[in-house]
Image (spheres, rainbow, N blue to C red):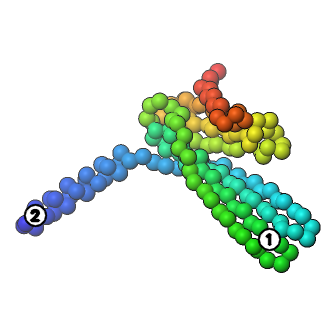
């Protein structure tokens, strides 16, 4: 191939790559991460501490999001750490809006089950807004205590 053809092909590939990047989805981490820990203490016996944290990853184009959780359990006696276990992952959740646009997002978790949750482990609230229009949707998702979550979203009215 001659040098002009190589340069032309390189420029064409550059534009194709830029076009694909412009169409790619954009993912953002929510600004509202939380951590909660619990302890099981027994004098002279094994002690266990468990911590969980949640965060949300949001697709700013489609309004789909992922609820991510990480947990760590530590077991020790009075002298040493005996066991450490960690786990985590993200679960895909449905779209908040039906159409693609440019969206903003935030979410927050309820307190643990010993404080304000009547239906098991509690729930979370999700807020999403359209960056191109005056459009906001608030959703609350709670555990029913029967194995399925209950989710309701409300479009905000601007008066």
Would you identify the image quadrant in which residue 42 lies? bottom right
Above or below residue 77? Residue 18 is above
Q: Quadrant of residue 49?
A: bottom right
Left or right of 77 on screen, residue 28: left
Residue 118, image x and y in percent?
A: 80, 35
| Disc 2 target residue | 4
* Whether residue 3 is situated above or below residue 118 in the rendered picture: below
Residue found farthest to the bottom:
79
Location of the N terminus (image quadrant): bottom left
Q: Can residue 103 be seen in this view?
A: no
| Residue 106, placed above or below residue 12 | above
Q: Give residue 22's position: percent from left, percent from top.
A: 36, 48
Q: In which quarter of the image is residue 143?
A: top right
Question: Which residue lies most toward the front here?
Answer: 45
Disc 1: CA contacts within 10 A as few (<14), some (14-19) or many (>=20): some
Q: Where is residue 70 in the image (x, y as percent from the top left)?
A: 64, 56
Residue at point 64%, 34% (across, down): 148
Depth check, front residue: 118 or 156: 118
Q: Residue at x 63, y 38 (%)?
A: 126
- Numbered circle sitting on residue 76: 1
Q: Distance between the residues labelled 1 and 2?
A: 69 Å
Relative side of 133 to 159, left or right = left
x and y, in percent, of residue 2 in the image: 7, 67
The local crowd at label 2, few if under 14, some if 14 to 19, many if 20 or more residues have their Cα within 10 Å, is: few
Task: Give the residue displayed 20% in from the left and 55% down from the top.
Answer: 12
Q: Which tag is nearer the camera, tag 1 or tag 2? A: 1
- Is residue 32 left or right of 6 when viewed as pictured? right
Which of the pair 87/125 is nearer the observer? 87
Residue 111: in sight, yes or no?
A: yes
Query: Which is nearer the eye, 47 or 95?
Result: 47
């Amino acid at each position: 191939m001659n040098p002009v053809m190589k340069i032309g092909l390189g420029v064409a590939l550059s534009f194709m790559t830029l076009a694909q990047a412009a169409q790619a989805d954009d993912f953002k981490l929510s600004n509202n991460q939380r951590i909660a820990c619990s302890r099981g203490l027994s004098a002279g016996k094994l002690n266990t501490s468990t911590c969980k944290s949640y965060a949300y990853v949001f697709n700013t184009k489609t309004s789909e999001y992922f609820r991510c959780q990480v947990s760590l359990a530590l077991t020790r006696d009075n002298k040493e750490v005996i066991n450490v276990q960690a786990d985590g992952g993200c679960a895909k959740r449905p779209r908040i809006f039906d159409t693609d646009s440019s969206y903003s997002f935030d979410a927050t978790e309820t307190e643990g089950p010993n404080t304000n949750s009547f239906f098991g482990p509690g729930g979370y609230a999700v807020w999403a807004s359209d960056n191109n229009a005056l459009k906001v949707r608030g959703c609350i998702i709670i555990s029913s205590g029967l194995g399925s979550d209950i989710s309701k979203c409300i479009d905000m009215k601007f008066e």
